[in-house]
Image (cartoon, helix red, strand yellow):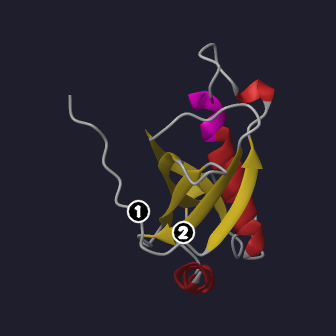
Amino acid sequence: MARIQLQLPAKFSFQTEIPVRITDLNYGAHLGNDALLSMVHEARVQYLKSLGYSELNLEGAGLIMADSAIIYKGEGFYGDVLTVKVAAADLNKYGFDLYYHFSNQHGKEIAHAKTGLLCFDYTTRKLMALPEAAAEKLSVS
């Protein structure tokens, strides 16, 4: 079976820390896959906020997730504080990708992830073009 491959960007423009909570553990006593995807969401919201945006207002556009991919590199445990680096890439007419690099407080890689985001008008329920001003901010950050 072929494995998913992600080519992370060379540079990450944003970084945050997210602790592993007891509720983030699965029956294997390590970070669960559902909790990691929630951490991706939290990192995305913080990244957008750092640019003055939200998922519902990116220069007037909303965002909707088109796809996601996670590659697990190591285990996360209760009490770990994960450093999450975020970078925007692959900007196109309707959206962009966000890449995420997760590591623990000891520098051990935990995961790589990518989410594909599309600009969406929640009133008309249709895709819309990536606003030029947002594309400029995302390209620099």
Task: Report the magenta residues as a range.
Answer: 31-37
Indicate left or right for 16 with 85 as reference: right
Answer yes or no: do the residues labelled 2 and 1 have beta carbons within 8 Å? yes
- In this rendered view, identify the residue nearer to me: 48 or 14: 14
Which is nearer the eye, 98 or 119? Answer: 98
Mark 1: secondary structure:
loop
Identify the residue shown where x is 72% and y is 29%: 24
Precedes in sequence: disc 2 or disc 1: 1
> What amino acid is at disc 1?
Leu
Is 17 one of the magenta-colored residues? no
Residue 62 position (above or below residue 36) = below
The image shows residue 19 at horizontal and vertical percentages of 76, 44
**Residue at numbered disc 1:** 8
The residue that mark 2 highlights is 87
Judge by depth and name the residue closer to the eye, 47 or 83. Answer: 83
Q: Position of residue 51 (x, y in %)?
A: 72, 76
Q: Give the structural element (helix, strand or loop) at label 2.
A: strand
Q: Is residue 123 visible?
A: no
* Secondary structure mostly seen in the magenta stretch: helix
**Quarter-wise, where is residue 133 in the image?**
bottom right
Which residue: 78% across, 25% down? 23
Q: Quadrant of the C terminus?
A: bottom right
Q: Does 131 sit left or right of 91 as displayed?
A: right
Residue 36 included in the magenta stretch of the image: yes
Which residue is at the front of the view, 133 or 47? 47
| 129 relative to 44, above or below | below
Position above or below: 58 against 28 = below
Amino acid at pointer 2: Ala
